[in-house]
Image (tube, rainbow, N blue to C red):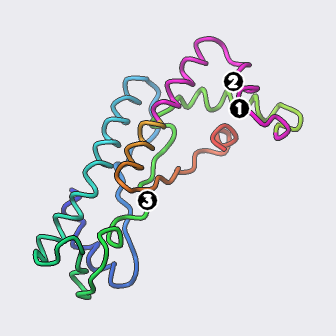
């Protein structure tokens, strides 16, 4: 439970450290699973600010909009106590098979960096693959929007090397 981690967060924040909050979800192969992962990750991203605010405000109710580090007693902005980022695995939101396909297209292309647009590579996909690609991009955008709305950053957790060109 996230709530159980807050006490540990209080202790490590005394050393100018922050924690990572992760709804750990690994590779999935179905669009239904990707959708469920988007819902779970966005729900987490929406919960994080209120969890931190309520935890620290409950510890020091007179602090108003400022937060108090419960270990050092130091006053600070609520953002000082928030996690720096929340990690996501692209393959929990996007087709691993499609990432492999795109990576193959990219690596077989002579001087792939001269193609400044991803459209060059996307044009080489089948109609069904293009639809899957578009849905994957929408999934990633939904998670990123939830993070932005809640003042959090996203860390794209590395994938297997044969998928990385498509992610990069």
Q: What percent of the width, then of the height, locates residue 16?
A: 40, 81
Mark 2–mark 1 Cα distance, whole angstroms, equals: 6 Å
Q: Quadrant of residue 51?
A: bottom left
Q: What percent of the width, then of the height, locates residue 70?
A: 21, 81
Q: Is residue 137 magenta?
A: yes
Asked which secondary structure carries label 3, the reply is: strand
Q: Which mark is residue 122?
A: 2
Q: Quadrant of residue 132?
A: top right
Q: Which mark is residue 118?
A: 1
Asked which secondary structure carries label 1, the reply is: loop
Q: Which quadrant, please, contains the N terminus?
A: bottom left
The residue at which mark 3 appears reads as: 85
Q: Residue at x 48, y 37 (%)?
A: 140
Give neighbour class at mark 2: few <14, some 14-19, many 20+ (Cα, 10 Å). Answer: some
Q: What percent of the width, then of the height, locates residue 116?
A: 78, 37
Q: Is residue 60 rendered to the left or right of residue 94?
A: left
Q: Is residue 33 rendered to the left or right of residue 104?
A: left
Q: Residue at x 55, y 32 (%)?
A: 96
Q: What percent of the width, then of the height, locates residue 121?
A: 74, 27
Q: Earlier in the sequence, mark 3 or mark 2?
A: 3
Circles 3, 1 touching at the beta carbon (< 8 Å): no
Whether 64 is drawn above or below 165: the answer is: below
Q: Residue at x 37, y 44 (%)?
A: 146
Mark 3–mark 2 Cα distance, whole angstroms, equals: 29 Å
Q: Is residue 74 magenta?
A: no
Q: Which residues are magenta?
A: 113-139
Mark 3–mark 1 Cα distance, whole angstroms, equals: 26 Å
Q: Is residue 77 rendered to the left or right of residue 86?
A: left
């Amino acid at each position: 439970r996230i709530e159980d981690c807050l006490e540990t967060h209080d202790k490590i924040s005394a050393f100018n450290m922050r924690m990572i909050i992760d709804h750990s979800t690994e590779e999935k192969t179905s669009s239904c699973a990707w959708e469920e992962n988007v819902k779970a990750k966005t729900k987490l991203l929406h919960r994080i600010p209120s969890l931190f605010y309520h935890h620290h405000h409950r510890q020091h109710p007179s602090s108003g909009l400022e937060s108090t580090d419960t270990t050092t007693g130091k006053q600070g902005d609520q953002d000082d106590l928030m996690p720096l980022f929340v990690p996501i695995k692209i393959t929990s939101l996007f087709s691993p098979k499609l990432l492999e396909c795109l990576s193959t297209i990219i690596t077989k292309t002579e001087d792939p960096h001269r193609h400044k647009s991803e459209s060059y590579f996307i044009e080489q996909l089948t109609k069904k693959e293009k639809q899957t690609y578009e849905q994957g991009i929408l999934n990633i955008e939904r998670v990123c929007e939830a993070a932005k709305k809640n003042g959090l950053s996203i860390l794209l957790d590395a994938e297997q090397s044969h998928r990385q060109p498509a992610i990069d």
